[in-house]
Amino acid sequence: MKSLIRSGFLALLLLAAAVPALAAPITFNTALPVARGQGIFRAQLQYLTSSDNGPGNRELEAWATPVVGVYGLTEKWALFGIVPYLDKELEVNTPMGRLTRDVSGLGDATFLARYTAFQRDRPGRTFRLAPFAGLKTPTGEDDERDGLGRLPQPLQLGTGSWDPFFGAVATLQSLQRQFDAALSYRFNTEANHFKLGDVARLDFSWQERLWPRKLGPGVPAFVYGVLEGNLIWQDRNEIDGRDDPDSGGATLFVAPGLQYVTKRTVLEAAVQLPVLQDLNDDALETDYVAILSFRVNL
Amino acid sequence: MTFRSALLIFPVLLALLAFPPAPGLAEVTQIEVTVKGMSCPFCAFGVEKKLKKVEGVREVAVDMGQSTATLVAGEGKSLDLKQINAAVKASGFTPGALKITAVGTMSSGKEGEGLLFRIRGTDQVFRLVNMPDSLRDRLQTLARSGAAVEISGEAHKHVDGLPGLEPETIEELDR
């Protein structure tokens, strides 16, 4: 039974693990500026469902509400803080019958800093390149228990580990469309005799202004059609220093979505669909992730 | 503070009280700045917020399609070009062309300098450039009379000293 439950959930890495902010992609970060002294608040609602057809017939449902705060330290430096609220439920067949294990509460907080290293501005057009680095901190509870004992590590709210990451994001934006691409790597460290596999991500986003077709005077609201992609690779987890064969692998998500962008707020929705899941052995596959998001300029 | 330094500061304070800067004389009444890189409504917020904090501003209007922000000074107030450039930079964008509307006086510059426009109440001087002959004749007349004029036009940076101003409209004032 233990092996049925402990198997890695690459899908859970999606929840609140991206670093979303600003007026750009829905599932990851951007290189667009935050004015010096300005703040941005963002709240997302993410719903994820995963399942498999193995003997355990596992079904995982997870809700995440990451809350993001952004602050423009200077015109080049932006600081981000992300704190997720998580609610996870796993159902699995066991010799004792079908079991449900669930947990909810605050997850691990992530902090990062982004620096605009290169920018080329033209009227109605910009290109920027911004490296970033951050740390996922063990603020989430990592010793949750139920009647069956300690929850398997992937179901815990937090990993208990301090996980540094770094990457870079490039943004090309015009009045009509926007492209973003980000590359990042997270070094997961060991805690509680468990180490999540390191994670590498390649994210890209294309946003096309659908409305208004012609720009009028002032600052009109925009409606963007969005198409995003997330290629996520995770190394195998380690339990007591040994690889967990039922974990890790690669997944490619495609996420069509819509954004309504005004001067003050952004409302957006997207659905991440796995188009390729090359997972190791019995790792749980993602069915889909639905995202509803709201941002406000402070 | 020592007694000696107090003795030095006191006359300066007296002079400032006796001859305060004349309010309403510094007159850049409107500036349109091109904001390079501003390409989405959410980003325009930061630009507008920063520009609203520029001293003397009564109104800021951002135009996404034109990539411009227009600042209008309050009654008797004047806008500072340097502050506007700094505000655009602080919002994470790049300031571009400036179109200014300012009140000042005309004069003839030294040999080769042509006509000069000095903004009233400041030491800001522009060399007038790229104007049709008909406008040049009118401006020369105004330079001789010393009358106050309101000029609107695009300001340019020049490597050889004075910034240039390409006048689009000119109005003679009786104040």
Image (cartoon, coloured by chain):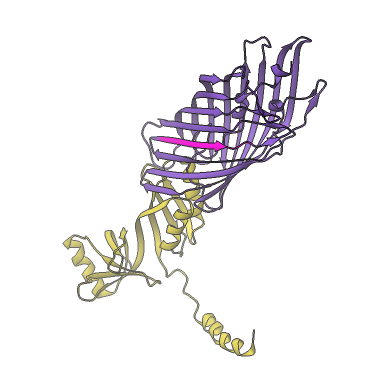
Is residue A186 magenta-colored?
A: yes
Rendered view: A213 above or below A51: below
Depth check, front residue: B80 or B59: B80
Task: Give me the residue at 40% from left, 71% from top.
Answer: B122
Task: Name the side, left or right, on which A220 lies relative to B16.
Answer: left
Is residue A159 magenta-colored?
A: no
Q: Position of residue A275 (x, y in %)?
A: 49, 19
Rendered view: A166 above or below A6: below
Task: Name the side, left or right, on which A27 lies relative to B120.
Answer: right
**Range of residues picked out in magenta:** A178-188
Depth check, front residue: A132 or A293: A132
Depth check, front residue: B19 or A168: A168
Q: Position of residue A209 (x, y in %)?
A: 41, 32
Number of numbered discs visible in the structure rendering: 0
The prevailing secondary structure element of the residues shown in magenta is: strand
Please indicate, yes or no, whether residue A20 appears anywhere in the rendered image.
no
In which quadrant of the rendered image does the C terminus of chain B lie? bottom left
Q: Position of residue B29 (x, y in %)?
A: 40, 61
